[in-house]
Each structure stands twice: as structure tokens, then as C-alpha cells.
Amino acid sequence: MMILQVQGVSKNFGGLQALSNVTFDLPEGQILGLIGPNGAGKTTLFNVINGVYTPSEGRVIFRDKDVTGKKTYHMAHAGMARTHQIVKPLNDLTVMENVMVGACFGREGHNLKNARKIAAEVLDFVGLNERSDQLAGSLNVGQKKRLEMARALASHPYLLLLDEVLAGLNPSEIAHMVDIVRRIREQGITIIMIEHVMHAIMNVSDRILVLDYGQQIAEGSPEEISQNPKVIEAYLGDPKLAQRLMRGGE
Amino acid sequence: MNTLKNYAGLLTSLVVVVLIALAPIFSGNAASREVVFTILRAIVLASSLNILLGYTGYVSFGHIVFFGFGGYVGFYLITAQGQSLWVAMLAGGLVSGLLAYLLGKAILRLRGAYFALATIGVNEAVRAFINNFEPFGGPTGMTMNFSVYQQYGGAMQALEMTFYIMLVLTILVVILSYVVRTSKFGLGLLAIREDEDAAEVMGVVAPDAKTWAFVLSAIFPGMVGALFFFKNGSVEPLDAFPLHTSIEMIVMVMLGGQGTVLGPILGAAGYQRMRGLLVTSTIFKNIQLAVSGGLLLLIVLFVPAGIIGWARQRWPKWRGVLQ
């Protein structure tokens, strides 16, 4: 079953064409990597999928329903969750309360008591359980990224959009986060992730989609992508580097 | 014992309110009753505003509009329609809530400073409307025939009764404030306060939540308006919609601690006490508003969390009691 279908989506801001005619289908349970140079439109594509922006053209179909132009909270209720590239912690609330918001207002709409239970489980899963009574504003960047992840997971989503969860992390934090992503997939949650950390995304993704200047320049398995001349020219640069990335990482 | 602990925050707040009200109840002193009546009114207004300002993070510079509008409608019902005080208060609360609902739909899409500016405009617009609305007496307002008080056992008894009604309203508003603060709805409001976009991405339906917060923050000021002008015996536009009182309400909330239940209670009581001293002092009586302005500046600069917010940071163990 296709969990998400993006059909001919374009988005322009005034004269700037941020996305043009992006089309792809995402089968349930897969991890789709979204890569491309800075300004290629990756985050814009996320914003169109989860309702921050209405596309200028095209349709977004989530779980067989046309959700084009729905608000972000509609998407949350329908079972889509996301993290932000620039983290958005609810600073003056505790870590626990942050995650409870996800459980209370997401797809399942739990009451406070159940939300507390779910939040505790999810915080345990991402390794933040010891910080649950701390204010979110007092966490460091790596912890804030995990908090974003926990909030998204607490809604028990069908589809999770991860926007550069590895950026700014040190190597051991990256390894930890990649492990978390794998375990999320094992729970049956479909994932789209934007990432610049190549060895990680090449290893974790089932398929990869490459954007450049808002155009979809390639789509395929990590092997195909790393050998695609267009991708090498636009993004990866050196062909040998691309092959090293495929071998490295793990 | 466990349930008692769960409600410790509510109990502290209620005890404070009752302590404030005790002196005139026991002494029977009319002057002290008047002072406490004013303090209770300030607590109702500040606690109501706190639902919007402290929990939801939206600054309303015109919140007194709900007090004035509810007061006018209640007064009209009593004097022109011969209704009882109870009907007047109920109607005052309802029309203020309704006004907030309609306004919320219109202006709560604005954020930050733009919303604050719009609320000033709303207060001035309603005042201008009432100024020119003949059924409400236009610029001269309305006065109440003394005989109205007869059905409450005479003016003295009516005066005393308004005090106890005000006390009940204060207790109800504190309970409302606590229930909102500790509910799922309240968690949604706090999320909006911290980051509205992030809250929406997590599924908080911010437009609805904000509108209902606005409505809840308007109902009690409307009821108190009806009660206040019943006691006052007259109502006119300048008394009903004083813009500076809106700002004083903000000072009270900020002083005590925005976003807490106890904060606005202490802030209102403390501010009202200070104001009483300033107004009667020969040096400060003409510049007491300047003192409020200075106070607000100091709070924002040095204790932005207010007294209770500061105490909660200082003594985390007491957070259960200091809510």
C-alpha cells in the first residue's frame, strides 16, 4: 500500500520556483532519503507534505485521502508527525510536558494520564528519561533533537518526516540517532528523512530522492543514486567519493 | 492525603483568597469591606486575563472592554428591563463571552504586537459605540433608581451582598484558572504560548484553543462588570472602559507571575494595596500610574517570571504548592 503519493507538486514564492513538478510514491514501511544541495527545496517539500504550505500546483495524497491544502494540525490528526531542522522546543515546559503535547493532540488524542505513560515510554526509547522533569530550554542541541523525535513519536504516527536530525551531532550521537531511526522503522513507521550526513542516509534508506533547484533530478536505490552522473555533478561532486560513501559508514 | 497533595496548588490559592476576605467578614467594618471588594475585583480581572496572557501568551491591552461591556448590558437589564441582579450578571458574562468569541474569530489570527494593537482598537471602538448608543444613555450613561435595591432588603444589605457575591466569583475564577492550568486544554494553551507553529504541527488546533481561551478570560470580567455597576448605581463610558485599567491588569499578572494560578492573585492584591497607598499619598496621588509603569518596567527587566515564577525557580520542591 502507498502511504503517501505526491503528484506533480509545485510551489513558488513570488518569482522563486521552490519546487517544480515533484512526483513520487512512498510504500508503507520504507525509509525514503531526501537529499540535495542547500536551497534545493527539501524542507519546502516537507512543508508542503505536512500542511505548512499549500502547493501552488499538484496534489498530496496521504493514506488514500487527498490532503492537499490541509492545515498542519489536520495532518497531525491524520497520523503524520515531523521534526524541525531548526529545533522548536517548548522551552518553559518540561521535557515530559513537551512529549505529552504530542501524545495528547496527535493522532490518538490521549488524555493527560495516558499521555504521561506514553511520554515516559518514548523518552525511554530516545534516551531522555532522566531529563523528563528538566525544562526543555535547558537541553543541549543533541538532546533537543532527540526531544523533537520523542514528541513526534508520542503521537504514534503512520508517517514520520525527519528534517536533518543528524545535523550538528557528534559521531557517537549520530550513531545513536541512526540506531533510533532503524528501530522506529522496525515498529512499522514509514519515514522520509532529509539528511546531509551521506554515509548515514546511504546506509539507512531504502530509496533516495534527489532534489536540485526544486527539480527532482533522480530517484532510486542508494547504489543507483551514488552512481548517477547527474547526482554526482549536482551534489556529491567526486565520483570516487560517492563510492567511498557507499562502502563507508557502517 | 494523596488527593490533598494533588490539589495543593488549588488549596493554597483558595486559602489566600479567603484570608484576604476574612478581615471585613469578622470586623463588619464597611470601609475595610470596600477595600477588599476592590482587591477581589482586581483578582478576578487579573486571573481572567492570565488565562490569555499567562497561559496562551497573547497580550490583550484592552481586556477591560469585557468588564465594561458586561457591566453596561447588566446595568441596562436591571434599570430598563427590571431584571434581577442574577439575570444581569449571567447576561453580562454571556455577552462578554460572546463578544470575545466573535473577536477571537476575527483578531486572534494576528500574532504578537499586532494582536495587542488590535485589542486597544477594540476597547476604543466599543467605547465609541456606547458613547453614541442612546438606549445605553450615550455619553452621560445611565443611573439606577435607588428603589431597585429594595428587593435586596435595602441599599445597605445590597451593598453587603455584593461583597459576598464578589467573594464567590473570585473563588470560582480561581477554580477555573486552576482547572484550565492543569487540563489537557491548558497544556495545549501552554504549547501555543511557547511556539504556536510547533504546537500546530503536534496537532493543537490553535485557532479554536485560542478562541476558547479568550472566551474563558472574558466571562468573569463581564459578570463582575454587571455586579460592580449594580453596586456603583451609575455607569458611564469613561468608568466602564478605562484603558489604563487594562494596563494595570497586565502589571498585576506580571507582578505576581504570569502563567501561574497563585501569581495573579498575589499580584492583584499587592498592586491594589500599593495603589491604595499611592492614591492617598500627597506626593504620589497624581502620578500613581507612572509608578505602575515604572513597576512594569522593573518586573520585565529583572523578574520577568513574576513573584511566583521566581519562587518556583528558587525553590523547585515547593512547585506543588506554588502553582
Image: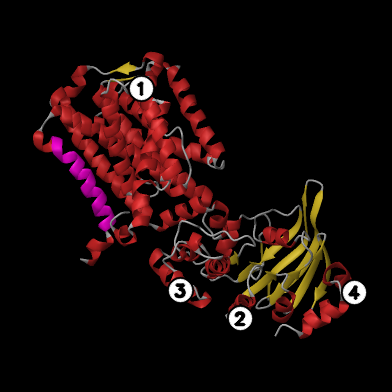
Dot label at residue A229 = 4
Asked if marks 3 and 4 fall on the same chain, the answer is yes
As shown in the figure, which amino acid type bears the numbered disc 1? Answer: Asp
Residue A199: % across, % down:
73, 78
Dot label at residue B239 = 1
Judge whether residue B39 is colored magenta: no
Is B167 situated left or right of B185 in this image?
A: left
As shown in the figure, which amino acid type bears the numbered disc 3? Answer: Asn
Label 4 – label 2 distance at C-alpha: 30 Å
Q: Which chain's residue wears label 1?
A: B
Label 3 – label 2 distance at C-alpha: 17 Å
Of the pair B304 and A120, the residue shown nearer to us = B304
Of the pair B131 and B10, the residue shown nearer to us = B10
Judge whether residue B19 is colored magenta: yes
Label 3 – label 4 distance at C-alpha: 45 Å
Label 2 – label 1 distance at C-alpha: 65 Å
Dot label at residue A92 = none
Label 1 – label 3 distance at C-alpha: 54 Å
| Residue under numbered circle 3 | A129
